[in-house]
């Protein structure tokens, strides 16, 4: 149990760091992007573009890009928050509780909804990033690949695990009440 507690403390703080880093990097990626696809600060949504279509973004484009990226980033942050809570429970030695199952379930739903939101966000970002380009150089991208499918499968597996853990917890509670 000591190993579980130590690793859980480490993971709790790692996910807490990610929770803090997501909005910082998302904000910096949009605000500091200078049009160079090799630049240090670039939103993950712009990484999939053909560099020929990218140009320096206006302040309006940066603000709109940040605005449409917020739901996807927010779901990632919510998922990280659920993992912070989960590993906090594990670090306290709480393994099979209703709160643990709820953390798994919420994180799985956030991941699943994030994969549904991603193509819409990518489409909006592609339009925003190229809306000031010359006619013929504008772009609308819609993408869905094996990474998205893999994340959906992982989310469904985590969701199923949360249900199994919750049923196991209920059975354990019933067994404790049985004389």
Image (cartoon, rainbow, N blue to C red):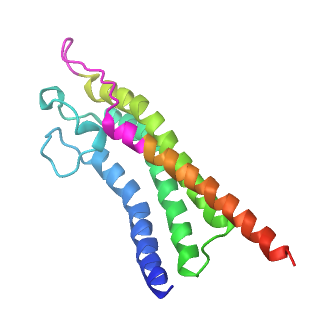
Q: Is residue 144 magenta?
A: yes
- Residue 35 drawn above or below residue 107: above
**Picture quadrant where residue 147 is located:** top left
133 left or right, relative to 21:
left
176 left or right, relative to 13:
right
**160 or 21: nearer the eye?**
160
- Residue 62 visible, this angle: no
Residue 103 % position (x, y): 59, 60
Residue 167 % position (x, y): 69, 58
- Residue 45 visible, this angle: yes
Please report the residue visible at 36 percent of the width from the left and 36 percent of the height from the top. Answer: 65
Q: Residue furthest right?
A: 179
Residue 134 % position (x, y): 19, 16
Residue 125 % position (x, y): 34, 31
Q: Residue furthest top?
A: 135
**71 or 143: nearer the eye?**
143
Q: Is residue 50 magenta?
A: no
Magenta segment main secondary structure: loop
- Residue 45 drawn above or below residue 94: above
**95 or 23: nearer the eye?**
95
**Picture quadrant where residue 173 is located:** bottom right
Identify the magenta region: 133-151
**Picture quadrant where residue 152 is located:** top left
Please report the residue visible at 46 percent of the width from the left and 72 percent of the height from the top. Answer: 12
118 left or right, relative to 25:
right
Name the quadrant of the C terminus. Answer: bottom right
């Amino acid at each position: 149990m000591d190993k579980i507690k130590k690793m859980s403390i480490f993971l709790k703080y790692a996910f807490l760091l990610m929770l803090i880093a997501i909005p910082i990097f998302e904000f910096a990626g949009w605000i500091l992007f200078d049009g160079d696809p090799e630049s240090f600060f670039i939103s993950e949504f712009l990484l999939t573009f053909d560099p020929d279509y990218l140009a320096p973004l206006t302040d309006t484009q940066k603000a709109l890009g940040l605005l449409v990226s917020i739901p996807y980033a927010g779901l990632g942050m919510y998922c990280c928050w659920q993992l912070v809570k989960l590993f906090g429970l594990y670090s306290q030695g709480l393994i099979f509780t209703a709160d643990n199952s709820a953390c798994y379930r919420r994180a799985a739903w956030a991941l699943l909804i994030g994969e549904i939101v991603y193509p819409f966000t990518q489409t909006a970002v592609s339009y925003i990033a190229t809306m000031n380009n010359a006619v013929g150089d504008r772009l609308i991208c819609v993408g869905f690949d094996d990474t998205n499918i893999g994340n959906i499968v992982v989310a469904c597996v985590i969701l199923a695990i949360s249900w199994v853990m919750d049923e196991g917890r209920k059975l354990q509670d019933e067994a404790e009440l049985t004389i």
